[in-house]
Amino acid sequence: MLLAAYALAAEGLPVFFLGRTKRPVANCPGCPKGDPNHDPEACECLTCHGFYAASTDPDRITAMRAAVPRGLLAIRTGGPVAVVDIDPRNGGRIVPELMPPTRAVRTGSDGWHLYYAHPGGALGAKLHGYPGIDIKADGGYVVAPPSMHPLTGRPYRWIGDRPTVAMPPALVDACRAPVPAESAPPRATVIPLSGGRGISSPEALLEANLNAVRNAPRGQRRTRLYGAARGIARMVKAGAITHARAVDELTRVGREMGQPERDIRAAIIGGFRAESVATEGIAA
Ligand SMILES: [Zn+2]
Ligand SMILES: [Zn+2]
């Protein structure tokens, strides 16, 4: 396991160790979860904050392994690689016309991880139009060989020895396309808000909220993201946008603006709570 970790690190892929159950190990008491004033990227702790602990430094990897001796090896995605994560249990399959042969892992649950060079820019979390396919890029991680899947007991294995190739434009497009809302209300409906105003153009209102974040001066992005979360939470309450899409759009704009994952989540949860909109599942 350590040799595999060193080898990946030598290629420039930051690695860390999950617990035995495929979940990140717990933070130390000094790193409380969800503290918006604590920057996980800057945190010096060896194993706190999940993928933020990932490193390419062999000494640090050795120390991490000593701290989590039985954990699964994982690669922090983003930076050099984006991984197409295909889960057949959810209907995922390799789509040959989109996905050229590349470096690949057969997962311990009969899925595939296809490694591609990160095309730059923000990528969505799901492959648009294809069920059961996630994109692991910025703010994500994948389990790496020779880890064993905790439920099936089967190993993750490298298949073949192809190099990591570039994403073809069609795949990049499918990664960037917005995830469609699962049960969007009819567009033409005017939905009254509590103040008696209507949302006659939900898409324009959504864009305005997101643009407020995009146009925020440095140092105000976190506050603006929180403000946008409140605005979009009100749209959720009014039925103008689904909860899932609201979270997606806010997450995407937060990443676009380079906000750390936990700050993004904290802003969304804070904003939704302030508007009494459900926050279950956001912290996952
Ligand atoms: Zn810590
Ligand atoms: Zn910390």
Image (cartoon, rainbow, N blue to C red):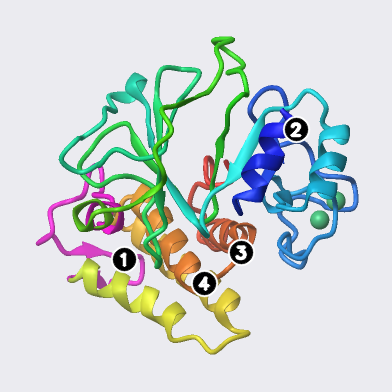
Q: Element type at marker 1? A: loop
Mark 2 Cα-neighbour bin, 10 Å: few <14, some 14–19, many ≥20: some
Q: Are marks 1 and 3 in contact (CB under 8 Å)?
A: no
- Compared to residue 32, the image places residue 258 above or below, namely below
Q: Earlier in the sequence, mark 3 or mark 4?
A: 4
Residue 234 in the image, given as x and y percentages of width and height: 40, 63
Q: Which residue is mark 1?
A: 193
Amino acid carrying label 3: it is Pro
Q: Earlier in the sequence, mark 2 or mark 4?
A: 2
Amino acid carrying label 1: it is Leu
Residue 225 is tagged as: 4
Q: Are marks 3 and 2 in contact (CB under 8 Å)?
A: no
Mark 1 Cα-neighbour bin, 10 Å: few <14, some 14–19, many ≥20: some
Residue 33 in the image, given as x and y percentages of width and height: 75, 50
Question: In front here: 253 or 184?
Answer: 253
Q: Are marks 2 and 4 in contact (CB under 8 Å)?
A: no
Residue 180 located within the stretch drawn in magenta: yes
Mark 3 Cα-neighbour bin, 10 Å: few <14, some 14–19, many ≥20: some
Residue at image position (23%, 49%) is 180
Residue 123 in the image, given as x and y percentages of width and height: 38, 58
Ligand 2 is in which quadrant of the figure? bottom right
Q: Earlier in the sequence, mark 2 or mark 1?
A: 2
Q: Element type at marker 4? A: helix
Q: What range of the chain is rendered magenta?
A: 173-200
- Compared to residue 254, the image places residue 49 above or below, namely above
Q: Which residue is mark 2?
A: 2
